[in-house]
Image (cartoon, coloured by chain):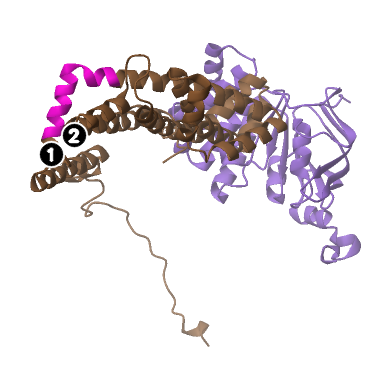
Amino acid sequence: METASMPERPEVFYEVSTERLNVVEKPLSAWERLYDNGAVRKSFLLAMLAAGWELYARWLNNPLLVPTFSATVSALFASIASGALPQAAAYTISMLLKGYIAGLAIAALLTAFATGTRIGADLLETLTAMFNPLPSIALLPLALVWFGLGAGSVIFVLIHAVLWAVALNTFAGFRSVSPTWKMVGQNYGLSRTGYIARILIPGAFPSILTGLKVGWAFAWRTLIAAELVFGVSSGSGGLGWYIFERKNQLLIADVFAGLLTVILFGLAVENLIFKTIENRTVRRWGMQV
Amino acid sequence: MASPLLTVDGVTLRYRTKDHLVTATYRVSFDLFQSDRFVVLGPSGCGKSTLLKAVGGYIQPTEGSIRLNAAEITRPGPDRVFVFQEFDQLLPWKTVKENIAFALTASGKLPRPQAEERAMHYIAKVNLTEFASSYPHTLSGGMKQRVAIARAMAMEPQILLMDEPFAALDALTRAKMQEELLQLWEETKFTVLFVTHSIPEAIRVGNRILLMSAHPGQVRAEVNSAGADAARIHEILFDEKQHGNSEHA
């Protein structure tokens, strides 16, 4: 009999105390905190990459193929000082902003139409399926025929680059907004526009932000490529043109400086602008870890 | 006798799934009076949540009518405020206080300064004052439900509609929340329509209980919870006395 072998046991009570416990809460060491900082880790990686570049270029010793990191940096500063690079960058940025904003506006209209009606949703889905895989730069020859050799053509291809990524992500975001939030919004008697502004947009914000980032990256790449193909328009060229022109003059360090500028802008927008928006919105709200 | 606040009269609710037309409830009738704690109790599949959504105005009955103060309910409105089972009913992009103030301003009940004042009053009622400026994702499940209840009560609606608000909580928190809800009722004597599938919860929370059968939901009985015992309700609910264990058929 198993039950018979069970001994008689008294009830026991213990004092709860943390007196002899060494660690309840202990600050991390300086090194651990440093390593936890993403910016520090990434800066370290960038420094290592720059050092690797410098070493390889010195070993190769052919500035027409790969100029050293230090030569690129000094070319960068020289171009900034001469005003050539800032002018090119300013031109590129202004074109980019025009195309980006126009793309966002059209995406907003299209998404609003798609959210309001079923046929609009079908239209958006069909158009996105058709045009999203089409590289914007492939439209440039056609754009040149339609809009001529000028800002109009570039803005057209930029809109194409931005529009589909943003519209697709925003619409997908609207669709995946929690049904409970939708019911909450209806419960408090929000108007149609109030419902979109106060429930749908914040509810879909993680997707919208992804769309904005992807759209920005597409636009940036498309623009640099378009400038390379396209060259000068209306008297001044952008970064793509700057790179192309310096290559023709065999100023390879300047070409690298131009590429570096493109990279630096990309990093700055991603890490300063989009990161800040992300930290103040979706991360703070716990909608994205 | 006073006239009822809410009349549900012979309501049949149907909804369409991908390949079926489902009858959720069939000719359900009951009356709700001022300050009632009216519980709809039934097994899953008895259409009780669908019924609550119909009272909320999200679904239209295919037969019968639902009237609030003799006026037909046609759409959702701030005079009937929902508390859902889901923890995500709070808007994550708003703090606790903003969630409540939002409800008051969005519905046009109060301008912003007064809305915030009233929000703080109700946050204090559910003992969350120190979390007023926290975002919902930092709160526990029980705290989120308390905020949702505070938000609904701050609206001071004609009826609170509660759809198994405590079902996703652990047993201890659940018992505590039931206690708190009763205390709040003692203070303000609000009218609540409460849906649950738990017999003990129905007896504890309600003063009157509507018992429903499943597939489709039909009314079995309407009883007072004072002096009701769980075993008897279980018998009525599953119809064991009359036909033996018909549930197994």
Which residue carries the number 2 mark? Answer: A252
Most distant residue in the bottom direction = A1
In front of the other: A21 or A10: A21
The shade of chain A is brown
C-beta proximity under 8 Å, tags 2 and 1: yes
Question: Around disc 2, counting alpha carbons within 10 Å, would you say few (fewer than 14), some (14 to 19), or many (20 or more)?
Answer: many
Q: Nearer the viewer, residue B39 or A253?
A: A253
Query: In the image, residue B102 lies at what x, y percent?
Result: 57, 21
Name the residue: 82% across, 57% down: B238
Residue bearing mark 1:
A63
- Taking B199 as reference, is A217 above or below it? above
Along the viewing direction, whichever of B87 and A44 lies nearer the viewer: A44
Q: Is residue A163 left or right of residue A116?
A: left
For mark 1, name the chain: A
Residue at 77 percent of width and 44 percent of height = B48
B21 horizontally vs B156: left or right? right
User: Which colour denotes chain B?
Assistant: purple
How many angstroms separate mark 2 from mark 1 (CA)? Answer: 7 Å
